[in-house]
Amino acid sequence: MNSRITTLSRCSGFLVSTTLTLAALFSWSIPATVAQSMRNQESIIAQRIATLQQSEKRWIEVDLSEQKLIAWEGANKVYTLTVSTGKSATPTITGTFTVQSKQVSGRMQGPDYNVPYVPYIMYFSGGYAIHGAYWHNRFGTPVSHGCVNLRVSEAEKIFQWASVGTPVIVRR
């Protein structure tokens, strides 16, 4: 990578810009930093999964690439359910979380949606939640605003099975 830094200067009355030089410098460092951050997160997720599988604890895995939610007890699968996660414009976050709170029913709203009576909500990070969805039947396809949508009957099962504090792992 070129370590020389060129400054702005006037040449024949025109402003000479170093935008391309700076873009070239940053195009090498930013993706490398993002890629390293993604590798670090994947490593943390893998370590957390390994630890949970060696325990007897209940935990939830959300696989974004497969559009699946798997409920585990240690290394034993209890439920494997098809979900709908965030669409590309409003992706579901990845990482390791825990169920922060539970509500049997609630209203969810944002700039372009306002849905009353959302059933079986389990918040795991800010406004991100696992919950039932009665307003669509496109499970297996990313269509949400970032939440993990389940069929209502399946959301009820997971809601009853999990408690506040249950680990939630969301991965690609």
Image: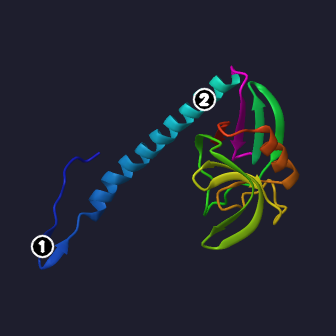
Q: Is residue 80 above or below residue 83?
A: above
Farthest residue, direction top: 54
- Which amino acid type is shown beneath numbered disc 2? Arg
Q: Quadrant of residue 57?
A: top right
- Which amino acid type is shown beneath numbered disc 1? Arg
Q: Give the x, y percent position of residue 92.
A: 63, 53
- Magenta stretch in the rendered image: 54-66
Residue at point 34%, 53% (across, down)? 26
Instruction: Name the secondary structure under disc 1.
Output: strand
80 and 24: which is toward the camera: 80
Residue at point 16%, 61% (across, down)? 7
Q: Residues within 10 Å of mark 2 (few under 14, many from 20)?
A: some
Residue at point 79%, 59% (across, down)? 133
Q: Residues within 10 Å of mark 1 (few under 14, many from 20)?
A: few
Instruction: Name the secondary structure under disc 2.
Output: helix
The image quadrant where one finds the N terminus is: top left
Q: Is residue 38 left or right of residue 14?
A: right
Residues at marks 2 and 1, CA–CA distance in whole angstroms: 56 Å
Residue at point 77%, 36% (across, down)? 71
Q: Is residue 140 above or below residue 157?
A: below
Disc assigned to residue 48? 2
Q: Is residue 22 left or right of residue 58?
A: left
Q: Quadrant of residue 90?
A: bottom right
What residue is disc 1 on?
A: 10
Disc assigned to residue 102? none
Farthest residue, direction bottom: 13
